[in-house]
Amino acid sequence: MNILVIGTGYVGTTTALVFAEMGWNVTGLDTDAQKIQQLEKGVLYFYEPGLEELLRKHLGTGQIRFTTNKDKAIQEHEAIFICVGTPSRPDGGADMRYVKQVAEDIGQTMNGYKLVITKSTVPVGTQEQVTGWIQAVQKGSFPFDVASNPEFLREGKALEDALNPDRVIIGTNSKRAENLLRTLYRSIKCPIVVTAPRTAELIKYASNAFLATKISYMNELARLCDQLGVNIIEVANGIGLDPRIGTSFLQAGIGYGGSCFPKDVSALIFAAKQNHIELSILGKVVNVNQTQPLYLLDKARERLKSFANKKVAVLGLAFKPDTDDMREAPALRIIDRLLSEQAKVYAYDPVAKLPADVQYESVASCMALEDAVQGADAVFLCTEWPVFQKVDWTKMKGIMNRPNLFDGRNLLDSDEMNAIGFFYQGIGYE
Ligand SMILES: NC(=O)c1ccc[n+]([C@@H]2O[C@H](COP(=O)([O-])OP(=O)(O)OC[C@H]3O[C@@H](n4cnc5c(N)ncnc54)[C@H](O)[C@@H]3O)[C@@H](O)[C@H]2O)c1
Ligand SMILES: O=c1ccn([C@@H]2O[C@H](COP(=O)(O)OP(=O)(O)O[C@H]3O[C@H](CO)[C@@H](O)[C@H](O)[C@H]3O)[C@@H](O)[C@H]2O)c(=O)[nH]1
């Protein structure tokens, strides 16, 4: 069976490469000719550890190829994964225009049986919608199935997650689709959950919203820790050892960002509202997350009195380490506020760059961490890049104007930083 992956972003490129690694012949299709040209040359146009090596390997084995020719690609492949974006609309719902476009492309062009698999994160009911969109434009009466197969990979660990998933969710009522998907995933060792399409669609949103809830809970608890003089890291360790709670996603910080949690939580709240259900807990999760970067800023303002004309180094821009993805990065909320309060902002990230928006023109983007820290009145640490732990902080203190360190990810050791002579403030940790 030949596999077509439509949309060669983070998920599509990873999916294509993982199926190539499993021995399938895969084609990646995108409307963006520049991305396709780069991928054809073996160049990954975003930062994701391990992916470029795999891309080069499978361009070499001939198991992967890329194209912008959608008609030919749709006709030549039986299994079609939809991996296009589903960004937030202004009302919070998921923007389905790219999925609809792909469904119509498939409907208009198909020339035989197609298994259409939605890997994009899509609202409950999408499987039925995609079926309808395909049927509405079909020229011949070719059979097809639409299945839901949500993706759970994390950026920065995309390859590792996609090759070793905790589970594969297959949402279908068709035995033919189920068997084909079981065949496609036959070399993956993990539980395969076959369920109704609507259930599969909700499992994806429910997972992300649950993880976001864990984070906001810890972030709110961290604010209490600051008042009580309790260390949130120790609290997280203590509660996490209960397997009913688990050790992961208990890290307090300046909040979650990225292309998934913010948009998916808001899409779930929106979908619930449409069904006359208020997911009130998730409303609070969003609220805590939106105020969390400002919480650290408030702590810093207390210390500095005012940000006006202060030199502030922002270390780490990406929403998490090992990615250059700046979508919904909490560092941007910090920078926006610092700029509005007339601070002089110097930014450094090992790989990520600030968006080319006019509002960031006054930010100095530094090539080296030292350039950002030199003469600074305060450092804000916004991404827990491991390399920041290896920095010679004694030396950094020596080149700063005032040794104030606001650690938005609780990455550094507060005792060590205090011993060096820093004023150190983390989140629920000092
Ligand atoms: N990024 C992640 O870590 C992640 C993880 C799991 C699930 N998801 C979900 O997967 C989906 C894709 O996310 P992403 O981050 O890879 O998005 P992305 O924005 O990086 O990539 C989407 C790609 O689709 C292409 N595209 C748009 N319309 C097209 C069309 N009609 N035909 C062909 N290509 C088209 C775009 O040019 C782009 O390259 C989203 O629904 C997202 O919520 C993302
Ligand atoms: O204890 C924690 C864990 C994470 N985060 C933050 O949460 C955000 C998201 O992190 P993570 O989940 O690791 O990255 P994503 O790549 O956004 O992955 C999430 O979103 C994807 C897209 O839907 C899903 O596929 C993944 O399963 C889900 O983890 C980042 O800003 C992290 O800094 C915390 O603040 N504290």
Image (cartoon, rainbow, N blue to C red):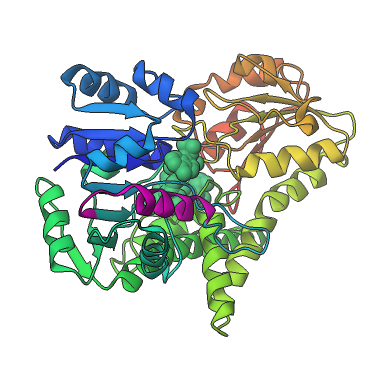
Q: Is residue 336 magenta?
A: no
Residue, x 67% and y 49% (percent of image)?
A: 293
Residue drawn at 34 percent across, 52 percent down = 152
Q: Quadrant of residue 187?
A: top left
Magenta segment's dominant SS is: helix
- Looking at the image, which residue sits at the far bottom? 276
Q: Quadrant of the N terminus?
A: top left
Along the line of sight, which residue is nearer the eye, 139 or 289? 139
Q: Is residue 193 above or below residue 361?
A: below
**Any part of residue 39 in sight:** yes
Q: Which residues are magenta?
A: 97-114
* 184 and 322: which is toward the camera: 184
In the image: residue 167, left or right of residue 426: left
Relative depth, front residue between 381 and 399? 381
Residue 42 versus residue 255: which sits nearer the camera? 42
Q: Is residue 111 magenta?
A: yes
Q: Position of residue 267 (x, y in %)?
A: 54, 64
Q: Position of residue 59 (x, y in %)?
A: 24, 20
Q: Position of residue 132 (x, y in %)?
A: 40, 67
Measured from the top left, where is residue 192 in percent x and y? 17, 61
Q: Quadrant of residue 166?
A: bottom left
